[in-house]
Amino acid sequence: MNQLRDMDSPSYSRRILDALCLDPVLLSLLLLLAGFGSLLLYSASGADMAAVVRQGTRIIVALLLLVAIANIPLRMIRKLSIWLYIGGVAMLIAVMFFGEVGKGAQRWLNLGFIRFQPSEILKLAVPMIVAAYLADRVLPVGIKELAVSAVLVAVPVLLIARQPDLGTAILVGSAGFFVLFLAGVRWRVMISLGVLLSAMAPLMWKFALHDYQRTRIITMLDPESDPLGSGYHIIQSKIAIGSGGVYGKGWMNGTQSQLDFIPERSTDFIFSVFGEEFGFFGSVVLLLLYLAIIFRGLYIAAHSTENFGRLLAGALSLTFFVYLFVNTGMVAGMLPVVGVPLPLISYGGTSMVTLMMGFGLIMSIRSAKRFLV
Amino acid sequence: MLKREQLKDDYLENRLIRHRLIWAAVFTVLLLSMVLGRLYQLQVVEHEHFSTLSDSNRVRIKALPPTRGLIFDRHGIVMADNLPAYRLEIVREQVHDLDETLQQIQQYVEVSDQDLKRFKQSLKRRRPFESIPLLLNLDDGEVARLAVNLHRFEGVEINARLTRNYPNGEHAVHALGYVGRVDERDLSRVSEMDYAGTTHIGKLGLEKFYENDLHGEVGIQQVEVNARGRTLRVLSETPPVQGNNLYLTIDSRLQKIAEESFGDYSGAAVAIDPNNGEILALVSMPIFDPNLFVNGISFDNYHALRDSHRRPLFNRALSGQYPPGSTTKPFYGLLGLESAIVTNEQKTYCMGYYKLPNEERRYRDWKKRGHGRVDLHDAVTQSCDVYFYDLAYRVGIDRMAEFMAKFGFGEKTGVDSTGERDGLMPSRDWKLGHDGMPWFPGETLITGIGQGAMLVTPLQLANSTAAFSRHGIRYRPHLVKTIEKIPQYTLEDTVSQIVDRYEVQREKNWQHVHEAMIDVVHGLRGTAHRISKGIQYQVAGKTGTAQVFEIAQDEEYEEDEVIEKLRDHALFISYAPADNPRIAVAIIVENGGHGSSVAAPIARRIMDAYLLEQS
């Protein structure tokens, strides 16, 4: 009997993880990625140990937040959604009036003790509020629900796009969209919306986009048109990735990266460094690792016992995918240059913290199921 | 279909969400496959292309200019070396606003329009990230002023580079020539690769003639650079090879003495070792400082030199062509004897002029009253014109032209320098070709005393004198004695080369003229008798006077009244010691009057310096 229980019982570390409400699979994948990211950062920053230490500190802080959020009961999270959303939108409006300007955009809010981008909050708050709103409705969503959700998503997205911060606007918008998608918006509705958006594209091109955004799109289509200006990033990035070949030039050996040809090489363009130093083979491995994380998130969503958890976990996992797709697509010259970092690897604390908090939510969702079993 | 009012059905909703999750997973995989496909295209399919781009991005070829070979005189005294000079250089790629930078630089140093023009030309043919010199020779004050403010100018550098220097200044300038900035014309003559990074090239004289030896081999450095063009490390390097060193035949001390001997006169002096054609001194006066030209001469300096009526830039020794005057008489004397037209003993009566049969025109002797009865010896020592009018008339222009050509008159000596001219030995064919006129007997007469159409360069005259002293053996005169090959450091001597040889038919004939030439200096009635005072060796010589303008038939020529510019050129040729000549000299003093008074003393000083000091 005793023996049987021993064989049956989870290992010691497994029990600790369970007690902390953490998913061992997801956590190890995240740690693997973050650890690997630090190694890459060391190379991309030109062997700057101080930068790696700073980033390591951020990872630890972000992981602590992950654990903290994972331990908040899902019911409470759901109740918090509305307040988080209202607070976030309020701060976005505050940013419009009192925000600090950095790199040509008004994104930062200084609360005296902390300086942060309210738009980051919305990356979590938008899927949360939409998921919370839809969770009690009959699915698939009807027109009214669709309209209410659309407003909930559009208000912060437009506020963020105004700053201007196209990258975050895309991420927030897609997070909201994914909740709707999972909640069963009919295909024909999505297709008609898609057609409508395409039809509006020329108008948006003319009125909604800033000059620099237009340039970025033109540059993406033909980087050689401005090799020393806005095309420079893309050209150098493509050279870096392409020259990596199948197996890459080796860690710390990327000439494009180490010789400073790649702008923003430790932040948004860190994937060019990766591609140059680890080649196609490394890229496949890295993308599979990301895919594993996404699939684990989708798996948790599928096995959640209530709609709020299903919708939220699914949307967060898919948003994580959007990060990955937009960043790699941009670095490989498939998409225009928008400020989206390579998730969990790019240097910088903001996205790291938001992403880990998102995974904290996912883990909380996973735990919620266990309480019922 | 479900109705809106229906109750929530968790089973159905769960199935719906799961379906959507599967769809999402499928989309995820599809989109990531697109990214992977893109990466496959970049990293596998087009890898070669990007790899090349990456290498050309980071690897730059830098040319390392070689150090120019040194020039020494025959005793190893430095004639041309290289000194570090501070240059202001600009890397175009690193300068944000070139015009503004140039303007700001001018607050600290003067930049002439010429400098700017040259700089802008060089900009056009530069390689990426090459530093282009704006100013080549900054003085200490300029360096200090710029260095303090250099941090304000990105892409502007002060670099010390070896630059040609002539430590003796103007001394021997016409023998050496000089280097100057490489220009478009130079680049059409040389391979651009060899001169990548080289800023100076031989423009004149030896420096130009021996450019291939002196320049050396360009070095190549493969360097890795960052995106801003800054050199990070050297990947591989082929060091440049210094140019070969030249040891000249010139004796610097002798050259200097010769230059000083001219005083304020313009003219030329060439001293040759008759035994091998080595040029011991090559003087053209006045001289100028070649250092002025190295880094681009200023407008004012250049115009001062170019417009000076004494024409210092003109290399008289090689390019100056003068009527040889009476210095031709020993040659014609030998010709007369060899062709048996005259004998050593035969005498001609000189009454102060000569008349051709059936012609009224009088061909004057320089001595109005005439020399009386003179034989060949007297005619040479006293330089009797009438004797040589008669001799020339009887020998005829054809034999004269043929004979003189044997001694190198009318053709380049083939010296190893630039700017040499032919001189002119007139003949029937020449005249017909030149102005389509037949040859007149009168022209034979004046050719017989070295006037008329005949022209020689000082080098030619010296070399012909050397050939005469060696009984007709004529060497190619040369300025370089030894080339020190770098990097082997082997010495390669110039082989003395006999160009032509006149076979004297009767040794006695040569001896007669030779003795007459000795008496020109040592005989009491010799025209150059005055230089024999205190002389410690025997000299054979001949004075000459070249008319600058023609005197009308009945006009008197009063030396004092003629303005200096129109005064006769004074000439003197000599070799010594007479019995075993080691030096042959030709002197031309422009507007110096008679050869005896001005030219001969210069020759004496050169010969003294060479013969007495040496033994």
Image (cartoon, coloured by chain):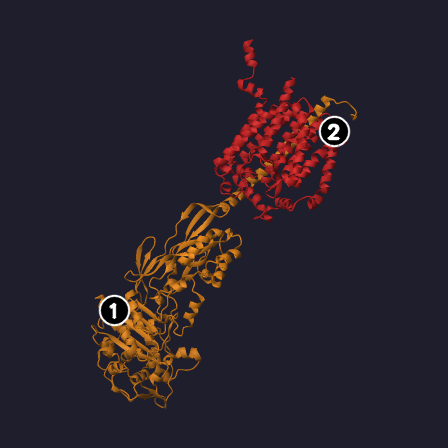
Chain colours: A red, B orange
Which x, y percent locates residue B142? Answer: 43, 58
Residue at x 71% of width, y 26% of height? A135
- Quadrant for residue B470, please give it: bottom left
User: Marks 1 and 2, Cα distance to the nearest angstrom?
Assistant: 118 Å
Against B264, is A191 above or below?
A: above
For the residue pair B460 and B368, the one nearer the viewer reads as B368
Q: Nearer the viewer, mark 1 or mark 2?
A: 2
Query: Label 1 amino acid?
Result: Ala
Against B331, is B478 above or below?
A: above
Which x, y percent locates residue B160? Answer: 40, 54
Which x, y percent locates residue A284? Answer: 56, 33
Against B67, is A280 above or below?
A: above
Give the left or right position of residue B517, taking residue B303 as reference.
left
Give the chain letter at badge 2. A
Quadrant showing the C terminus of chain B: bottom left
Name the mark on residue B402: none
Name the mark on residue A141: 2
Against A7, is B610 above or below?
A: below
Q: Residue furthest top?
A: A1
Give the left or right position of residue B582, taking residue B429 as reference.
left
Q: Residue furthest front?
A: A112
- Quadrant for residue A337, please give it: top right
Query: Label 2 amino acid?
Result: Val
Would residue A39 be visible to someone looking at this image?
no
Residue at x 62% of width, y 27% of height? A361
Would residue B532 be visible to someone looking at this image?
yes
**Mark 1 neighbour density, 10 Å: few (under 14) some (14–19) many (20 or more):** some
Residue at label 1?
B609
Give the chain letter at badge 1. B
